[in-house]
Amino acid sequence: MGVGTQSTIAQSLSQDADRPEVIAKKKVTEVSTKLGLNDSQERALFRSYTSYEMKLKKNIAGKDLNEPKVAAEKKEYMDDLKANVKKALNDEQYKQWLALLEE
């Protein structure tokens, strides 16, 4: 019973780590620490990142990023993310956020 339970828990934890909400929460926590976001900004970024990660997982994951159609879709999703983040942050925070993307 112990070994089966441990592997089930470990499997469930690794599955949770791949969920868009979990990825979004991690990214927002990192960004919030570096940019000093307020609660409203954190919520807006969480929604934006969750949407972005869901689109990536559904439409891009496992596909060849060198294929023009796939690359165009990914760029479109990133452009949407940037537009949504820009609405939530002030100008200085947005510049800092763009710099974080380059890291």
Image: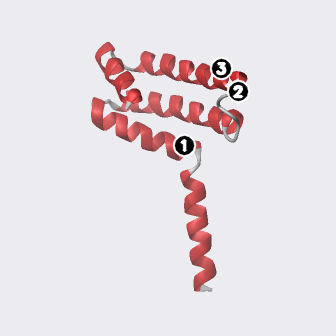
* Mark whose residue sits in front, 2 or 1: 2
Q: Relative to the observer, which residue lies in front, 96 or 91?
A: 96
Look at the numbered disc 3 and give the secondary structure of its residue. Answer: helix
Q: Residue furthest top?
A: 91
Horizontally, residue 39 falls left or right of residue 19, namely left
Q: Are marks 3 and 2 in contact (CB under 8 Å)?
A: no
Give the Cα separation between the discs numbered 3 and 2.
Answer: 9 Å
Residue where numbered disc 3 is placed: 72
* Mark whose residue sits in front, 3 or 2: 2
Q: Which of the two discs, 1 and 3, labels the residue nearer the N terminus? A: 1
Q: Are marks 2 and 1 in contact (CB under 8 Å)?
A: no
Q: Which mark is residue 21?
A: 1
Q: Could you say which quadrant of the image residue 93 lies in? A: top left
- For badge 3, the amino acid type reads Ala
- For badge 2, the amino acid type reads Glu
Residue 65 vs 87, above or below: the answer is below
Q: Residues within 10 Å of mark 2 (few under 14, many from 20)?
A: few
Residue where numbered disc 2 is placed: 67
Task: Say how many tags the image has.
Answer: 3
Q: Which of the two discs, 2 and 1, labels the residue nearer the N terminus? A: 1
Q: Relative to the observer, which residue lies in front, 77 or 2?
A: 77
Q: Position of residue 1 (x, y in %)?
A: 63, 86
Q: Which of the two discs, 3 and 2, labels the residue nearer the N terminus? A: 2
Q: Residues within 10 Å of mark 3 (few under 14, many from 20)?
A: few
